[in-house]
Amino acid sequence: MKKAFRIKKNEEFQAAFKHGKSFANRQLVIYYVKKPDQEHIRVGLSVGKKIGNAVTRNRIKRYLRQAFQEMEAQIREEYDIVIIARKPTKDMGQEEIRKSLNHLLYKECLLKNNQRKSRH
């Protein structure tokens, strides 16, 4: 994932929390805001200190970025998405995190192949 497509500023995270919709499973929470004029998806990651030390948090972020890279072509472009990791991610591998993320994106109709039943 290119750095230009990451959400970095606190204001952008807060806008997603305040104006966006959210959906969660046991491992992850996503907040997403539709930005119709946007040509590329933007992603912000949040892994809190309760989850573990810096090594653990960075590993989880690396896994999430890798999952997004693999799924990037399938995700609808016009969204800002913020992903918050929950405690169970501490013990998960890369494939499990990818499946969890895919589940959330599918359920919220953020994947291109399930636009037909989109609620947005």
Image: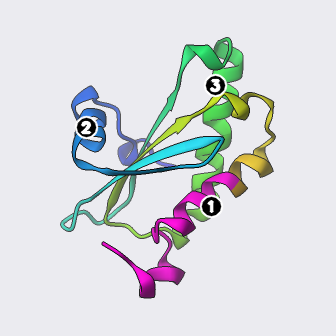
Q: Which residue is mark 1?
A: 102
Q: Amino acid at mark 3?
A: Asn
Place of residue 15 in the rendered image (x, y in percent of width and height, measured from the top left): 22, 40
Specify the amino acid type for callout 2. Glu
Furthest-left residue in view? 37
Query: On the rendered image, what quadrant is the C terminus found in?
Result: bottom left
In the picture shown, does residue 94 fall above or below 68?
above
**Residue 44 x %, y %:** 42, 40
- Of pointers 1 and 2, the one earlier in the residue sequence: 2
Give percent across and percent down for residue 107: 54, 67
Q: Which residue is mark 2?
A: 12
> In the figure, residue 106 lies in which quadrant?
bottom right
Label 2 crowd bin: few (<14), some (14–19), many (20+), radius 10 Å: some
- Secondary structure type for disc 1: helix
Residue that numbered label 3 is attached to = 58
Mark positioned earlier in the residue sequence (3 or 2)? 2
Residue range of the region highlighted in magenta in the rendering: 100-120
Mark 3 to mark 2 CA distance (whole Å): 21 Å
Instruction: Tell me the distance, in whole angstroms, between the alpha carbons under discs 1 and 2.
Output: 23 Å
